[in-house]
Image (tube, rainbow, N blue to C red):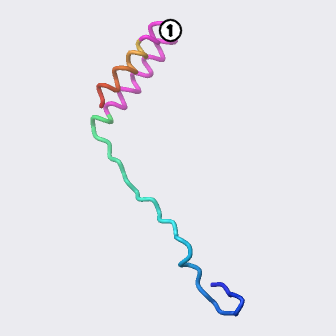
Amino acid sequence: MSRNSNEKTFNRDHLFVKPQPPSIHIHESTKLEKFGNILLWIFCLFCGLLIAIFPPLGFLVAGLGILIIPILFK
């Protein structure tokens, strides 16, 4: 509540739009998505080891994986 120059009180709440909380959407991943995530982590670890042992082969496998994995899990 505020007072104007005439000493009358008025409510300013209608002047401001109160922000609404964002809607909560819980995404439940399917078994295929979980399997794909696990497979991706294993692939990343494998490529990391290959790059550490023999870099050209590791980068080749990683590059092919970047091209193939998104196509498999569309």
Name the residue at 35% across, 26% down: 70
Q: Quadrant of the C terminus?
A: top left
Q: Which SS class for mark 1?
A: helix
Q: Which residue is mark 1?
A: 55
Judge whether 27 appears above or below 13 on screen.
above
* Horizontal side of residue 37 vs 6, given as left or right: left
Whole-percent x and y of residue 72?
A: 29, 25
* Horizontal side of residue 11 vs 46, given as left or right: right
Prevailing SS of the magenta stretch:
helix
Name the residue at 72% across, 89% down: 5
Whole-percent x and y of residue 34?
A: 33, 35
Judge whether 26 appears above or below 1 on screen.
above
Residue placed most toward the observer, 22 or 2: 2
Judge whether 65 appears above or below 3 on screen.
above
Residue placed most toward the observer, 71 or 48: 71
Which picture quadrant has residue 13?
Answer: bottom right
Which residue in the rendered view is the most extreme toward the right? 5
Whole-percent x and y of residue 1?
A: 63, 84
Residue placed most toward the observer, 55 or 64: 64
Name the residue at 37% across, 32% down: 37
Residue extent of the magenta highlight: 35-60
Mark 1 crowdedness (10 Å alpha carbons): few <14, some 14-19, many ≥20: some
| Kind of residue indicated by mark 1 | Pro
